[in-house]
Image (cartoon, coloured by chain):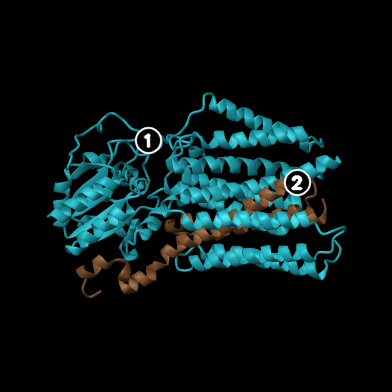
Chain colours: A brown, B cyan
Amino acid sequence: MSVELLSALTVFILAILCGFAVISKVPATLHTPLMSGANSIHGIVLVGSMFIAIEATDPAAQVLSFIAVAFATMNVVGGYVVTDRMLQMFKRKPAAASAAGGASAPASASAKPEA
Amino acid sequence: MGDLTALETLVRIAWLAGAVAFVLGLIRMNSPATARNGNLLSAGGMALAIGATIVFLLLEPRQGDVNVVGWVIIAAGIALGGGLGLYTARTVKMTAMPQLVSLFNAVGGGAAALIAIDDYLGLAGTGTLPTLQVNVATVLDIVIGSITFTGSLIASGKLMGLKITPSKPVMIPGGQLVTAALALIVVVGAVYLWAGNLSLAVMVAILAAALVFGVTMTLPIGGADMPVVISLLNSFTGTAVAMAGFVLDNVVLIIAGALVGASGAILTKLMADAMNRSVINIMVGGFGGGEGTQTAAGGAGGSVREISADDAAIQLAYASSVIVVPGYGLAVAQAQHGVRELAELLESRGVDVKYAIHPVAGRMPGHMNVLLAEANVPYPQLREMEEINPEFDRADVALVIGANDVTNPAARHPGSPVSGMPILDVDHAKSIIVIKRSMGRGYAGIDNELYTNPKTGMLFADAKDGLAQLTAAVKAL
């Protein structure tokens, strides 16, 4: 076994353990955004797709690598944007707590005058 | 191992920084306060890793001419994929968000598989036998990536309710046999290639079998279980990307892929646990019949009291405290705006309104919070299960909208498929109103004792229509 393969395996296994460790006490509310966030991270496959695209010389490889780059970019860009949209909604929480709904819930203002 | 050039060193350090950002980003996403910041950190790491790769490809001294076509491919691919991703992610309705995540997962898995296919085509073209580790990684990448690609597309289609992929479980005639045959083709083919044979035909057979396997694996699973399936396939994609990293000898793909593979697996288990089901149970079909399972029997073992919208409206309007229990039916009917409208109307009459959110309410864990937030329901009104359960004792009315199994008191005693599942103590409220389309069962396929409780009034309607009727009736009071 080569040194390169052994170090790659080492990194692989440590990264797996790291992945197990980072998810532990997540509130259920965050399961979906977290899944979506992890989904964006595997968009890193774009790096590999660019490597095969730059090496592509025959038409088959060119078509395959074009699809790979397009797919991977869609994964990255769409993944992060949709995750941010989900999390943006959670972010209202502190604002809503201090302003008691504020502009977002006009009807509730009349019911609770002190808010 | 020779020394790296300065350029290579910088690029690899940038990749390392990207990987660190992914890990720290995921950790920050564990808590609501830091989640958004964590996602941005992760995105920043991604931008750094991709940017460094582009710089590397531009400056790297390579033999021969600059591959102009290669750059055109990269530019066009990024423009097309980025445009599609940005457009769909920004315009999708929040109710349709799970199927979009599944679609992004599909293309990620597809890209990972394409890398291995491309690599194998190159090897087959020159007749070079790959080293064993590349050979193993290539086959695994193609198999896992292809299963994820078609499996995620089917999952996405099921959530969209497409005709060709109905959300109810689809039984393929001789399905188990077909699945077993496909698995056999993959295993035999893989062993043949790993034994040191170079065969494009065998690789194509493996690819085809894996693509079909993804379809036959996902089709028989009911729509209600899709979140767990999507999460599992997300974990698969991570693994496929790590394999692509071994094929290309690229460490950042290995790290990020393994990270997602492992964290996705844990997340899948958490989701399944919250539904009191095992992942294996879900994958082989289990007892789940999906939301579509309907029974003709009008609720065995007790009579059901039907209530009119007007009567229900009177109960709600003159209550001092109402707890709303939104469920799957509300998500399906996209009735989140309707429920907020009714709640605001009740609040304007001085009724205290809160929402009880079961951990797995909606189509995905946490989905209900997102849906209600989108409808501008004030966050402080949303209560988690542990927090709200004691309050049912003091509530005048519990309004259950399209939630079933998560309210079933049968979970408290043994001998039922839902036994042990944490439930909302809806039956502790002074009276209960249930909006539901029919007496159909939830995905657990069992009767809900709540519906035959003397305190319960059933309002048979689609969640959206039922809420509209209630709102109109309260306004008329």
Q: How many marks?
A: 2
Which image quadrant for residue B66?
A: bottom right
Disc 2 target residue = A61
Residue A90: give x, y in percent of width and height: 42, 64
Report whether residue A45 is seen: no
Indicate whether B402 appears above or below B396. Answer: above
Residue B120: give x, y in percent of width and height: 77, 43
Residue at x-position 54% and y-position 60%: A80
Kindly state the secondary structure of the residue where label 2 is placed: helix
Disc 1 target residue = B292
Bin the neighbour count of mark 1 within 10 Å (Cα to Cα): few under 14, some 14-19, many 20 and up: some
Residue B357: give x, y in percent of width and height: 34, 55
Given residues B396 and B475, the one toward you in this image is B475
Q: Nearer the viewer, mark 2 or mark 1?
A: 2
Disc 2: which chain? A
Residue at x-position 60% and y-position 34%: B212
* In this rendering, position of residue A41 left or right of residue A7: left
Residue B420: give x, y in percent of width and height: 37, 45
Given residues B129 and B430, the one toward you in this image is B129
On-image quarter of the N terminus of chain B: bottom right
